[in-house]
Amino acid sequence: MAREARLFVVSGPSGVGKGTLVAMLRERLPRLGLTVSATTREPRPGERDGVAYYFLSEDEFDRRAEAGEFLEWAWVHGHRYGTLRQEVERVRAQGRSVVLEIDVQGGLNVRRSVPDAVLVFIEPPSAEELERRLRGRGTEDEASIERRLAGARGELEQAGSYDVRVVNDDLERACSELQEVIETYENNGGHTEDVCDQARD
Ligand code: 5GP
């Protein structure tokens, strides 16, 4: 059966491990398209412009937003982050599915412009575990951790608006589940009963 290129959004609170999960998914499914987001936050050590993000000044971000260059953009932890339309179009032109790792507001905005986008929410096993992981990363100062924890509570409340939820209790297991979600939607538009029918044939 023909595989259909789809637009997937993966969201979840900061520290839930979605970056690691998506990186692992890309290793398993190298055919997935890669897009680079734009942000106004400062690069962290080791982050390269055009690879981790396009690091833009406030003025440049404004200019691009006004020119309608973003498919979506949102304020996250006090900075702006956005998906450039051109990035998504480049990948879709190659006939590949796109996985956008973006925040919940961004995800819900994508759904408005691309109604058949598939929204996947990555959940922590518990709120305590999320805080432990966030502090364990050691990349943020206390103020930033507090901001991210507050943001996480808000994001978790919106998980119900997403199409699919995956609990990141174990990386390998969660990645397999995420891979199955992607392949199911690509193969038959997300109608799981069809998958079962095919398996019986
Ligand atoms: P970080 O600063 O840790 O790289 O990313 C912080 C948050 O920004 C993450 O939760 C990530 O999902 C979100 N984010 C990254 N790129 C985008 C984007 O293009 N649009 C939106 N709305 N959020 C993004």
Image (cartoon, rainbow, N blue to C red):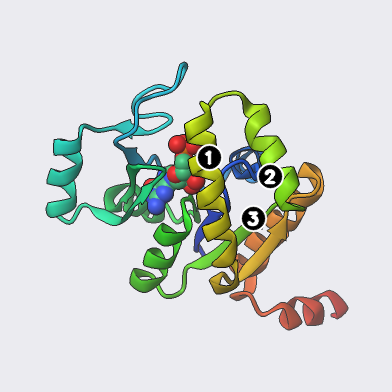
Amino acid at pointer 3: Ile
Query: Which of marks 3 and 2 precedes in the sequence?
Result: 3
* Label 2 vs label 3, nearer the camera: 2
> Where does residue 24 sit, x and y in percent of width and height?
67, 39
Q: Which residue is mark 1?
A: 146
Name the residue nearer the viewer: 16 or 50: 16
**Which secondary structure, mark 2?**
helix
Percent coordinates x, y for residue 177 in the rendering: 75, 57
User: Vertical placement of 151 versus 194: above or below?
Assistant: above
Q: CA distance from mark 3 to mark 1?
A: 20 Å
Q: Nearer the viewer, mark 1 or mark 2?
A: 1
Q: Quadrant of the C terminus?
A: bottom right
In this rendering, the label closer to the viewer, 3 or 1: 1
Q: Quadrant of residue 157?
A: bottom right
Q: Three-letter amino acid code at disc 2?
A: Leu
The number of discs equals: 3
User: Could you say where residue 88 lies in the image, as x and y percent from the top left?
Assistant: 36, 52
Which is nearer the eye, 86 or 15? 15
Viewer-closest of 179 and 16: 16
